[in-house]
Amino acid sequence: MSFRLAAYAVCIEDGRVLIARHVSPKGESTWTLPGGRVEHGEDPFDAVIREVAEETGCDAVVERLLGVDSRVIPAAERAIPGGPEHQNVGIFYWVRIVGGQLRPEPDGEIAESVWAPILDVANLRRSSLVDIGLALAQTLPATGHVAPVPVGGLIQH
């Protein structure tokens, strides 16, 4: 089984959430939260700030820890054909944008970042990470854990 530790930013302002459009090497487009892999030896707190800057062009500060999500993606459902099962552990932070300007990720897979009305998110093809992040932000569970989000239809791994 492969494994990845990642840090994700939940940025909410005026009923809108900051989301990023990820375009896979195959050209498939999926909306996700800004964030990604925690590098070897990197603190997830620092990783989320770095990832927001890299992917969106914005400067962020962490307001609070929201929670942690752990999911196992079966080998048959992975984007990488023939790959093993994959576990992704995501640490979700509530962040506030304090500067910068939205732009595509230079030489990356994020084609654009936008402030989307939260009510419109349900109609977008998106990563389940978006739903997990919004659920954590809206409920602020003391455990830092929310129920898994079923994948299918508009909701992807």
Image: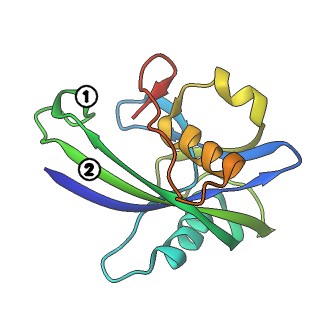
Q: Nearer the viewer, residue 54 or 93?
A: 93
Mark 1 is on which residue type?
Glu
Image quadrant containing the C terminus? top left
Q: Mark 2 vs mark 1: which is more N-terminal? A: 1
Is residue 21 depicted above or below 133 in this figure?
A: above
Specify how the rendered protein is coloured: rainbow
Q: Where is residue 77, by image quadrant? A: top left
Gap in angstroms between the C-alphas marked 2 and 1:
12 Å
Is residue 24 depicted above or below 155 in this figure?
A: below
Q: What residue occupies the far bottom of the structure in this picture?
A: 41
User: Are the residues tagged 2 and 1 within 8 Å (C-beta)?
Assistant: no
Crowding near the residue tagged with mark 2, few <14, some 14–19, many ≥20 C-alpha atoms within 10 Å = some
Residue 112 visible: no
Residue at (18, 27) in percent of width and height: 76
Which residue is labeled 2 in the image?
87
Which residue is labeled 1 in the image?
77
Residue 93 location (% of width, % of height): 60, 64
Q: Nearer the viewer, residue 104 or 68?
A: 68
